[in-house]
Each structure stands twice: as structure tokens, then as C-alpha cells.
Image (tube, helix red, strand yellow):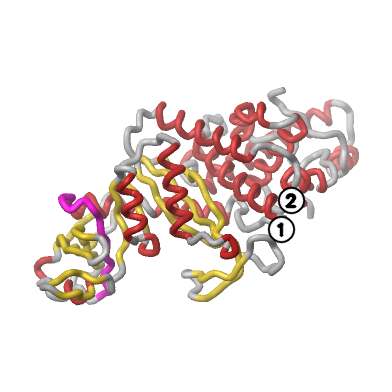
Amino acid sequence: MKTLPIVEYPKVVEEFLPNFADLFSKPQLRHLAQYLTGLILCDNKTVSGINDAFYGHRDQSTKNHFLTEAGWPDDQVDIVRMNLITEHVNQRHIQDGCLIVDDSLAHKTGKHIDGVGWHYDHSQDKIVLGHQLVSTHYYCRSFHVPLHFEVYRKDEGFTKNQLARTLIDRAVATKLPFSVVLLDSWYFNKENTDHIGKHHRDWIAACKSNRLVDWKGHGVALADVIKEAPREAFRKMALRNGAVYWVYSKVLTLKTQGRVRIVITRQREDLSDDPNYFATNRVEWDPTRILNLYCCRWTIETFYRDAKQNLGLEACELRIWEGIKRHFQLVFLAFTLLQLSSLNRGLGKWLSANLRTIGGKCQLAAVEILRAFIVFVARETSRQRSADEIVELCFRPAAQLRFSFA
């Protein structure tokens, strides 16, 4: 059964669409609005699924052309998005934040899709086919948004770490206020930490247990050094997110990094579980501060989850590289607009509890569209159209939807 046709854009799209009007022709702006709306609302987030969801839609080839061939300025779209983020940060008088670096796989099944490759998936513990995105994420207080991304392609000769350093440069260029960069263990290496240091930023990273420590004149694995820590050296620590750990901290000299503060966490009071290791260049910081900051890294994980589950990051069926990149770009844009939206909709307090999540915000947009459809049916009924006529009107291609702000 075909779902109800979309007869109006959700407020989150209408609110920000004028910011992009100078970058697109009117037909292109319509495609932008429809694609963003489809990413937020449609169950089927492919080009054909989004196209068919709209009342009065044209052939899907026009949207394929918009994504793969139309000459709109991708870089300028990202500049406008960054300006919106910066404006939001300034309005909230935010003076510091964290930059997070990570990667994720957009799984695919077709081997002949541009840019696709075989990559190790940690969540499945196996090699899978997909696009691997390396990205940066900005976090401050309760606000977080994705910044930039690059797709790791083995045929282009750049490593993921090289892409990460490029993305850090781009994040610094935005002038967004952040003083610390958060890394997982993959990105914890001297090249990356030195690069962060050149930008006068600090770093906190997850650390593998086999990292070599300069210990009593020898190179000893970190895990072996920590075995010498007495049980009473671990103290109970509650973090801002409610998690409770048993924590031990010590300043050590890593063979490749020099002097760092190492923080070891365990979840069990008897210390019988496997420890996690963290390192930072700020040797004077308290372990509580280090762990509370590192917990902010989780927001990039929730972004990737929401982008896949709610916004169609993995739904693109295009095979042409230009269209694939633009699909990823518009997913990042859709997430950003949902985070920036004022969300003052007046649709009842029963929705407000969910507005802290992307899924809840997508649900609110769906309620808005349902309301718009009810208004549409009421209007057509007032014009003496029968129920059969309204159904036929809804589910046949007709005149194009017009912008409500025009």
C-alpha cells in the first residue's frame, strides 16, 4: 500500500531552505527540499522512493540528474551549513567544545558501485563491502553536529589517518571553538597527535594495551606495567553520564608519544574484567575530567547510528560517484538542520519528550506532514471533490508542489 503523499515540506526544511536559495536554480531548490524531506520522512530513502512520495511528482530521472549531473556548488552548500552551525554556537555563547574523529561503514551489496571497497567491520568482526566514511563531529554542551567527511578509497592512495588530519585542518578553519580532539585507538599515533599539537589543541585517545612504555630502561607493554598497580590504587569514580568505573591513573612515557597521562578503567569492583586504556597529552588533568571529556566521543557514534537508521545514510542506490558523495552530503545536512531547528511547532506537549533525539524530531516532521495532508483533504472536500476524486488526485503525477515560502 502506498503511503500518504507528501503535500508540504516539514517546517525544519522550510525554516532553512532560504539560506540555500542563492546556490540553486528554482528547480534545483525544489529537488533539494524534496530530497531533504524524503531523507527525514520516507521509509524508502532511495531516489525513486523519495520522488514517488510527493504529491504531483515528476519522473525520478530529474532527481537522478540533480544528484549526479546538475552543476550546483557542493562546496558552497557546506560553507552555508558551517555558517549556520557557527551562528548557532555564537548565539548560545559557547566558548569551547570537542572535536571528534572517527569512521563508519555504509554497507553495500553491489561490487560495481563507484568508491565501494572491502573493509573490516569491527561490529561484525569480518570484512564487508561498503563505503568507509572518515568524519569529524563537533560537540559542545548538549549540542552536537557532524562537520566534514571524506570517503576512504584505497585506489586514491590516502590513508584514513591522512584523511583525518585533513579533516582536522578543515575543522580548525571553521573557527568553531574547541580545545580538545577525541580519538579512538585507530587514530592514536604520533603523526596525528603532533598534527593536533601544531593547531595548539589537546587530545585524548583510547589506547591499546600493547603500546610500549619506557619502563625501568626497557620497552614494556602498557598492560604489563599496569599489572604492578596495587588493587587499592583503583578508586571508584562516577561520571556525568551516570557510568561508574574503578579508575587508576599514572603519568608514563610512551615510546612514540613521550610523557602522557594514562587512565585505566574497569567496571567491576573486583577488577576481574578487562581494562580500557586512555591517554592524553595533558598530564596535569584529573582522571575525572579526562573520562568525562572522552565520553563526549559517543556522540559521533549516535550520529552514525541515526544517520543510518533515520536518515538513509546506507540507502543510496546510485552508482555514480558524484551522486553518492552528494547523497552523503545531504544526509549530513539533514542531520544538521534537525539539530539546529527551533522545534517550536505548537503540536502538543505529548511530543516534547522525544525532541532530544533525531528519531523524535523525524517523528515530529511526520506529524506535521500528516496535519498538512488533513488540511489538503479538507480543502479539496470544500471544493466539492468526492473521496474517489481526492484519492485519484493524490496518487497520480500532477502539477509540481510549490514552495510554501515563495
- Give the camera-side residue of 239 and 83: 83
Q: Residue at x 54, y 69 (%)?
A: 119
The alpha-carbon separation of the residues under discs 2 and 1 comes to 8 Å
Viewed as shown, does residue 108 lie left or right of 289? Answer: right
Q: Earlier in the sequence, mark 2 or mark 1?
A: 2
Q: Residue at x 45, y 54 (%)?
A: 164
Q: Secondary structure at mark 1?
A: loop
- Give the camera-side residue of 260 and 17: 260
x, y percent for residue 214:
17, 69
The range drawn in magenta is: 273-286
Q: Residue at x 51, y 71 (%)?
A: 120
> Which quarter of the figure is the C terminus placed in?
top right
Viewed as shown, does residue 103 lie left or right of 68? Answer: left
The reply to whether discs 2 and 1 touch (Cβ–Cβ < 8 Å) is: yes
Q: Residue 47, which numbered label?
A: 2
Q: Residue 317, which numbered label?
A: 1
Viewed as shown, does residue 48 lie left or right of 171? Answer: right
Give the amino acid type for the residue marked by disc 2 in the picture: Val
The residue at the far top in this view is 406
Q: Sort mark 2 into few (<14), some (14-19) or many (20+) by Cα contacts within 10 Å.
A: many
- Give the camera-side residue of 212 and 404: 212
Give the amino acid type for the residue marked by disc 1 in the picture: Glu
